[in-house]
Amino acid sequence: MQTRLIGSTSYFSKAQLEATNFSRAEGIDAATEFKWRKTTGNLVKQAIKKLKLPDWVYETAMTYINRYFLTRSISKAERFSVVGGAVLLASKVQESPRAIYDIAFVLHELKNANKQQLGPDQRQVEKLMEDMVVAEQAMLFALNFNLVVETHVSLARRLLEPLDLWPKQQPALEEVEANQLKLFLFQAILRFLNDSALTNLSLQYPNQKVAAVALVMAAKRLAVRYTGKVMPSALQRAVVLANDAAWFEARGLTLEAAADIEAQISDLYATAPDPALAQKAKPSAPQQVALQQVPQQAPEQAAISAGKARE
């Protein structure tokens, strides 16, 4: 008889997750499940973009979805209803609520994007709203009402500030280049963390542990740019952490666990460009404009704005 795992703050080994995987019990292989996760993640991103919600609603919604499927097979769920329920709940928790009709309307548009329609089918929108409420309620029980998810920006800041690697709002002229490197490092961490939501790492490790590995991964990827060149001391401070057992231990990780997290994230890029290496070494014109706007924004928003301007 299959063990029924419950969400909340419990964490599980890969072996446990595989042995109790409801999708696998119904004949859905790992490759199919990963494709489903990726498609679902893209749908969440599209919905959040159309709803003009902050990035951390995506992070929170994906955590909820991963927990939700601890006790369900992906074959038993209607994707748009689950995404709607997760976005509805996450937007409330992250203090950026959107009306349920607005979320359902956007998802209905995305679902029928390739169909020729004169306008939205109100009956379908209303049915989706009903299904979203059911999904939200089921998600609350799957999470045991433990809804707190620390944002990726907050996780990155707690790691970077002690290393003097947090980007400044208004760097002095002589600090602009060094500050740009810090900004690239911050953006790379966020990319790795966002992509990690497509795995089930949030079911295996607390987010702060995944963030520690994301920092090391970001530093190592950026260090490739300096092959054969003198690496900036700021970047060196982050790169050396890769083999610093004491630093990982202070964050509740062994080197073996850190390597496991890195391997699972790296697997995402087996057939795709590395997100950190995809960034250019020199800031583009939009990045320069974004950096000039930093003084008017909080550090978190400034860094995110610079990243969005680059994209």
Image (cartoon, rainbow, N blue to C red):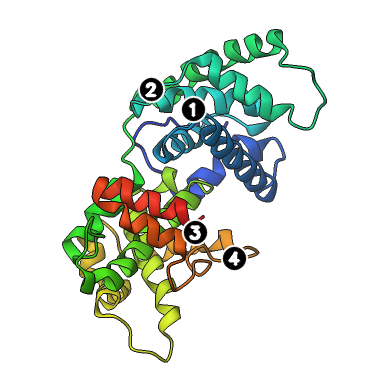
Label 1: state its secondary structure. helix
Residue 229 in the image, given as x and y percentages of width and height: 38, 90
Of label 3 and label 2, which has the lower sequence position? 2
**Pointer 2 local density, CA inside 10 Å: few below 14, some 14–19, many at least 20:** few
**Pointer 3 local density, CA inside 10 Å: few below 14, some 14–19, many at least 20:** many
- The mark tally for this picture is 4
Of label 4 and label 2, which has the lower sequence position? 2
Q: Which residue is mark 2?
A: 92
Q: Which residue is mark 1?
A: 87
Q: Which residue is mark 3?
A: 265
Q: Amino acid at mark 1?
A: Val
Of label 4 and label 3, which has the lower sequence position? 3
Compared with 10, 159 (above or below) is below
Front: mark 3 or 1: 1
C-alpha gap between disc 1 and disc 4:
28 Å
Residue 76 in the image, given as x and y percentages of width and height: 66, 26
Q: Which residue: 19% across, 67% down?
A: 172
C-alpha gap between disc 4 and disc 3:
13 Å
C-alpha gap between disc 1 and disc 2:
8 Å
Q: Amino acid at mark 4?
A: Pro
Of label 1 and label 2, which has the lower sequence position? 1
- Checking the image for residue 273, the label placed there is 4
Of label 1 and label 4, which has the lower sequence position? 1
Q: Residue furthest bottom?
A: 228
For the residues bearing labels 4 and 3, Cβ distance under 8 angstroms: no
Q: Amino acid at mark 2?
A: Lys
